[in-house]
Amino acid sequence: MDKIHIEGGHRLRGEVRVSGAKNAALPILCSSILAADTSVYRNVPVLRDIATMGKLLKNLGCAIEGERAVTVDSRQVSGFEAPYELVKTMRASVLVLGPLVARYGRARVSLPGGCAIGARPIDQHLKGLEAMGARISLVHGYVEAKAKRLTGARIVCDIPTVTGTENLMMAAALAKGHTVIENAAREPEVEELARVLNKMGARIQGAGTSAIDIEGVDELHGIEHSVVPDRIEAGTFMVAAAITRGDVLVRDCMPEHLDAVIAKLRTAGAEVTVEEGGVRVRARHELNAVDITTQPYPGFPTDMQAQFMVLASVALGQSVITETIFENRYMHVQELARMGADIHVDGRTSIVRGVPKLSGTTVMATDLRASASLILAGLVASGKTEVLRVYHLDRGYEKIEKKIRPLGAKIRRAHVKGEL
């Protein structure tokens, strides 16, 4: 296993490029199942989760080649199961459910269960598929879904769910008749998937709003597509620039996907300007406290909560951070406290009182975004920080240490034996 060493206290300056979005690439890869054809996807990030999805698609019979440019040949799909061994490591594996039922009339997918940041059930996925005529059964920890052909339906989601909306949108693309998904997730990744499906021949309108209309078609075809930039990676780099009082141009990002993050950075006192090719973040003075409540898009993203908690930990004054999406997304708090952060958690609310300086130490990552927050904390801490269990980090950040080292960060990766 690897760990990351950081020597804190260095301002970040320069330019950094954002990779393709993991949370867009995963459903896009799954959408290839809908076409008995070959598709080519470009700007695919090289990540553990992408590799896991590749294993799953190969397990289903797809032929896959390449990394950043990935070719998926789905003409010989012969398997219909997403096994527990893969689903347990990446919940997004459930995204094969809708495409398999839509094209082949059957699927067997392991229940994802809980994860480090809380339980994330798939009841909205199943409710929508049942509305479209699928017969759903739960057998030995697996969801089994069958349908001769799905039929259009009006589906009202109890809550906006990104993967649920994506799964149902893919299923409805090949369903017979008209489908409406109400209270749909509005995230850019949902809109990106709709863009891909429409290029494949689907008829989808309203993606990016709370009501999505899909007119089912008989077949879809392969395409070439370049994956949208990762807004969470971009946001992480932006926070890194702000907390180190740096000056960084974050290239290849889409500022319109980052409105809530940019607004909070400006509230904290950072200078954020949109330039040709990206977003520049400068911080000339100490940052101010900022209150945050995570919300579904276009609200403040839960995937940026941990990073902003680091900002709040070194800002002037008291910040209040409320997590409304996941019930257990404060696992980074105890590690930040070991570095000297002053954080009090009461249920889903955290009171963060800024301190003059964090202190470097050995910390352990518990999930993907917690890993990023500990990297950020190490950048501003005095002394040296070691971040263990960085395999979490590699699920969603493509060699982050190599990207920020040219900005002036003193950071390196080391292999270690016997890490817990």
Image (tube, helix red, strand yellow):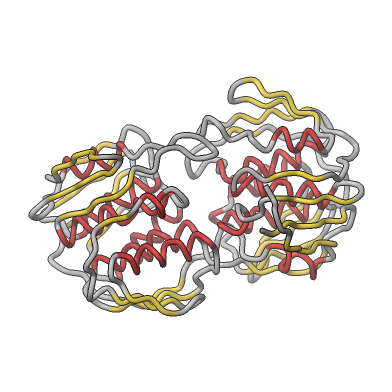
* x and y, in percent, of residue 338 in the image: 80, 35
Residue name at image x 70 percent, y 53 percent:
418
Question: Observer-nearest residue: 49 or 324?
Answer: 49
Q: Which of 274 and 400 is in front in this view?
A: 400
Say whether residue 350 is left or right of residue 109.
Answer: right
Say whether residue 297 is left or right of residue 300: left
Q: Residue 295, image x and y in percent?
A: 51, 37
Q: In this view, does 109 lie above or below 36?
A: above
User: Picture quarter containing residue 354?
Assistant: top right
Residue plotted at (20% across, 45% down): 129
Identity of the residue furthest to the left in this view: 148
Residue at coordinates 41% horizontally, 53% vertically from top-left? 85
**Toward the viewer: 206 or 41?**
41
Is 383 above or below relative to 26? above
Task: Name the quadrant containing residue 267.
Answer: top right
x then y, percent, for residue 196: 34, 66
Q: How many marks?
A: 0
Q: Which of 418 and 307 is in front in this view?
A: 418
Q: In the rendered image, which quarter is residue 330 located in? A: top right
**Residue drawn at the location 61% of the way across and 45% of the way down:** 304
Residue 209 x, y percent position in the rendering: 37, 47
Tell me if 76 is positioned left or right of 209 in this view: left
